[in-house]
């Protein structure tokens, strides 16, 4: 018995170490080239270099994630330091999952779900992850907190903070939170609304102060709200494959469970989890792919556990441990596959990052572009991976923003004469988001003067 007590005493530390290890494997073994990661790194990198979002480079997302992730870059402006910070966030997130599920059930799910979330979410650390983290904290409060002024205040802070990560889904969540509070609690409506909005005013005030300090208030609205109509129309995409169908069925299963258990118990938390699951699913719109739907997949596991977590699992303890080990092993195998046959970069900001492509192309094209620049022919790279050229060169540029433009060709029209456009010869097939009007206009109206490493050089002559 004393030995068992010692094991239980150190179990939380051991499990934290396991989650930290799994998070490290998941993130550090990713190869260079994940555009979501490299774009988000660029946004935070720009802040660390003194550039202002919305003014110096376009940003359709809210600034919270870029600002938070810029913190390690003020210490060391490298992708590896950015990833180390991601590891800490992912570990904290998975531990929060563990604490939440532990409040729901003492079954083995409290160990299984955190491990699965590392596997499902770990490769998709973007501003959507920040939104998901806020949702997780809100669910924890609703399950464990008591309805009082402190709770309303804290819910307001977190709900409005979710808007600071994702303006669309976050706004829906903030509105739903106040509706849910008004319906399910008996205190004075005025008191609930007052303390909720008081808490919500804190992230709003911080955002306003940041925008006013940077003198980017009007540019923020243009980028983050008005341009979303163009972004949604031009950036929507739908993939249908077995993985996505399976994830959608899992999410629907959690919805059906919530409806079923609400009918049986009349517990409003089932409706809360149902609606929040759908709100998290909205993260996958307008781009429904395996990456964007992963957030709803991770969250619906919490919903399912809340519904059935207290039922005795229909398999033995040995099988339960084996199942957890299988998911943990899957992360290790995932990391090993990622590293197999890969080189480790030894270059500036990208030092220590695995890669399956050589940086030689980026370095050679940068050197060739410098020749044009020095001769009075300024170059402009148009590519979904253009930011890698600038990172490799130690300079800065935000990603292309053509999805946000009603008429992307206007960008080319505004370029000065003698500008040389550097664009991939396979631009349209490189990424589905690449702009066909941009490519067609360049090859039709610009003079091709060279080709280098698979990139065409087109001169603007008028």
Image (tube, rainbow, N blue to C red):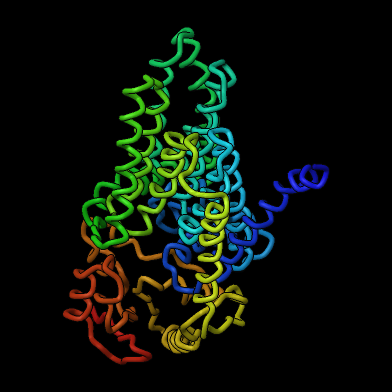
Q: Position of residue 441 (x, y in %)?
A: 19, 74
Name the residue: 33% across, 48% down.
Answer: 250
Q: Position of residue 55 (x, y in %)?
A: 44, 53
Name the residue: 20% across, 81% down.
Answer: 443
Residue 364 visible (yes or no): yes
Query: Quadrant of the image for the N terminus?
Result: top right
Name the residue: 46% across, 58% down.
Answer: 124
Q: Position of residue 167 (x, y in %)?
A: 39, 41
Residue 201 visible (yes or no): no
On screen, 268 above or below 402? above
**Foreground residue among 170 and 333:** 333
In the picture, measured across the screen, residue 287 lies left or right of residue 388, that is left
On screen, 331 above or below 166? below
Query: Quadrant of the image for the C terminus?
Result: bottom left
Residue 433 sits in quarter? bottom left
Name the residue: 50% across, 42% down.
Answer: 211
**Foreground residue among 77 and 146:** 146
Q: Position of residue 117 (x, y in %)?
A: 50, 52
Q: How many marks?
A: 0
**Foreground residue among 42 and 219:** 42
**Foreground residue among 390 and 273:** 273
Residue 140 sits in quarter? top right
Specify the farthest residue to the right.
Answer: 2
């Amino acid at each position: 018995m004393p030995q068992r007590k010692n094991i239980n005493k150190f179990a939380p530390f051991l499990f934290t170490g396991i989650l930290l290890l799994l998070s490290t494997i998941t993130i550090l073994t990713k190869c260079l080239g994940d555009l979501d990661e490299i774009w988000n790194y660029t946004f935070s990198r720009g802040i660390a270099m003194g550039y202002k979002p919305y003014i110096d480079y376009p940003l359709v997302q809210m600034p919270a994630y870029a600002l938070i992730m810029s913190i390690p870059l003020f210490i060391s402006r490298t992708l590896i330091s950015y990833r180390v910070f991601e590891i800490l966030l992912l570990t904290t997130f998975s531990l929060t999952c563990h604490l939440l599920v532990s409040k729901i059930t003492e079954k083995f799910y409290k160990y299984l779900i955190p491990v699965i979330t590392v596997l499902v979410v770990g490769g998709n650390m973007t501003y959507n992850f920040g939104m998901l983290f806020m949702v997780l904290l809100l669910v924890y409060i609703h399950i464990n907190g008591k309805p009082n002024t402190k709770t309303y205040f804290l819910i307001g802070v977190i709900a409005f903070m979710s808007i600071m990560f994702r303006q669309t889904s976050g706004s829906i969540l903030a509105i739903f939170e106040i509706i849910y509070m008004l319906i399910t609690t008996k205190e004075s409506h005025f008191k609930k609304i007052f303390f909720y909005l008081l808490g919500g005013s804190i992230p709003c005030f911080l955002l306003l102060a940041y925008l006013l300090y940077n003198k980017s208030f009007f540019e923020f609205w243009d980028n983050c709200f008005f341009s979303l109509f163009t972004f949604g129309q031009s950036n929507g995409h739908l993939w249908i494959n077995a993985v996505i169908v399976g994830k959608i069925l899992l999410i629907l299963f959690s919805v059906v469970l919530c409806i079923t258990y609400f009918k049986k118990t009349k517990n409003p938390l089932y409706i809360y989890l149902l609606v929040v699951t759908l709100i998290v699913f909205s993260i996958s719109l307008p781009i429904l792919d395996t990456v964007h739907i992963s957030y709803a997949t991770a969250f619906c596991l919490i919903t399912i556990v809340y519904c059935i977590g207290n039922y005795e699992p229909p398999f033995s303890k040995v099988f339960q441990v084996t199942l957890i080990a299988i998911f943990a092993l899957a992360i290790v195998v995932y990391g090993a596959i990622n590293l197999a046959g890969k080189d480790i970069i030894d270059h500036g900001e990208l030092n220590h990052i695995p890669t399956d492509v050589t940086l030689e192309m980026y370095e050679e094209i940068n050197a060739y572009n410098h020749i044009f620049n020095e001769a009075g022919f300024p170059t402009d790279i148009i590519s979904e991976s253009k930011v890698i050229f600038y990172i490799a060169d130690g300079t800065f540029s935000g990603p292309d923003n053509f999805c946000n433009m009603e008429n992307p060709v206007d960008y080319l029209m505004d370029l000065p004469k003698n500008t040389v456009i550097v664009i991939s010869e396979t631009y349209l097939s490189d990424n589905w988001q690449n702009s066909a009007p941009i490519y067609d206009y360049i090859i039709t109206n610009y003079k091709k003067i060279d080709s280098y490493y698979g990139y065409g050089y087109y001169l603007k002559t008028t």
